Image: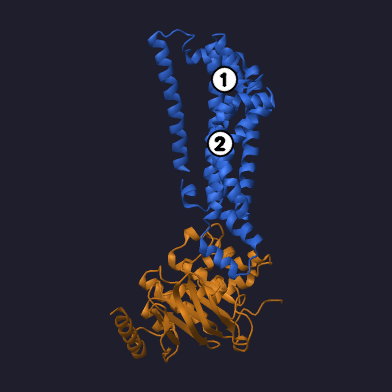
Amino acid sequence: MKSSNLSRLRGLLIFVGLIAIWWAVTALSGIPKFMLPSPASVAQAIWVQRAMLTHHTLVTLSEIVLGLGFGLAFGAVLALAMILSKTLQSWLMPVIVVSQSIPVFAMAPLLVLWFGFGMASKVVMAVLIIFFPVVAAFYDGLRRTDKGWLDLARTMGATPYAEMRHVRLIAALPAFGSGLRVAAAVAPIGAVIGEWVGASAGLGFMMLNANARMQTDTAFAALFILALVAVLLWQGVDLFLKRILYWVPDSSAN
Amino acid sequence: MNKPAVADATPGKAGQIGIRVRDLALRFHRHVIFENLSFDIEPGQFVALLGSSGVGKSSLLKIIAGLQSPSAGSVTATDGGPVPGRIAYMGQQDLLYPWLTLRQNVTLGARLRGEKPDLDWADHLIERVGLTKRRDALPMMLSGGMRQRAAIARTLYERKQIVLMDEPFSALDAITRASVQDLAAELLADATALLITHDPMEACRLGKVLLVLSGGPAKLDAPMVIPGAIPRHQDEPHVVAAQAALLRRFQELQS
């Protein structure tokens, strides 16, 4: 309880400190407003454009959440399929590895061409960068189940299904968790890059638009909201993982 | 009312079965671990199998448990039936599942088989191993000795006629090990048990019959029978003599 209060206080202090430095730089350096707007003008932009920001935030958030959902599901299913079938594993693994050698960001224009300017291309983009860390981590976790746990389960008459359901899946959750953490960190990047290449809505689209019109304070406002979304997403995932991984000494100690 | 017969922690003498091992062989490619291995474990007997590490003790136990296939030979129960499915297994660690509470770990077998857990039976066993107060604790909250006692309760919960143990106490400190050994010996008094160990003291305190597996390909010495009720005290003349004999034997094997 005490240490979580302390970490909350620390987070607040870092936030306030960064804003103060930002403010000091704008106040003392004489950098023009269209290069680096002050915190106050960004706050004002957020307030004035709150309706528009809300709209675009919801679009980007939907892309992130959908991308995360599909990416996790896709990654988990691939990992499970590869564990259940050696043949499938030997055919899929090279494909997955090669797919990662293509820079996904370089594919963004193609994705927009194929899936349009709407949300679909951004969701696909996010899925493409999310599924790999999930597959890699989860597959590894499923493969490394403690041999002793499996032996014990077998002597107790567990069927392969029960062994998967009660032992291997649960034992692989910490590994899945580290995949999920990486996925949560990269999901916003996927969505925003997709929006930069071609979109009609979303925070990335808003930033690009504002930049082109020298409305740097609006671009900063969108960036600020995006950072907030990313931090909240990370916190949410962290909280969720701490709850389901209550039995892993590290995650419950804090 | 409809309470289970909680009075006896192990199957009655009538239900006892032993193990018959015949011409067992284990080979990896051309490397022979053991060959023509034959021995009997009488119903209700506590047998300790000794040997240095790498000699094939654990593989032998896994073959008996049905977790590994032998290259040749057979393992049957003394009543002619199969052995896998009639054994309870204790591995080299306590093997408690860290995400389950102590009580859920004790009833693990029921969970894995999709049965309704027998909580009265589980609570009775948890009481016998002295962990009633820690019933709902996660394994990570328990000391090494407590975890091993929980593993004993989980083994007894299975109500199997044969108990196979693969160095289950090797990770414990000497004092804790002695008390957990006593508890195991007391609770497994009526079961047929095969204990694998590299510790002569453990073998001499717990085993009715001692088997020594050595060499490559590994062979069994003639079984050594130690008189006296189990668990024996480390000062008993039988234990001291047997331990000295074992150490002598191991020294011979080394040279």
Chain ID of residue with mark 2: A
Tell me if mark 1 has few (under 14), some (14-19) or many (20+) residues whose alpha carbon lies within 10 angstroms of its own: many
Q: Which chain is blue?
A: A
| Residue A242 in view in this figure | no
Q: Read off the residue under disc 2.
A: A184
What subunit carries mark 1? A
A172 left or right of B234? right
Marks counted in the figure total 2
Give whichever of B149, A8 is nearer the camera: B149
Cα distance between the residues tagged 2 and 1: 19 Å
Name the element at disc 2: helix
**Could you tell me if residue B86 is visible in this image?**
yes
Same chain assignment for discs 2 and 1: yes
Identify the residue under disc 1.
A222
Applied colour scheme: by chain
Disc sitting over residue B2 in the figure: none
Q: Residue at x 54, y 78 (%)?
A: B72
Rendered location of residue A80, percent (x, y)? 62, 50
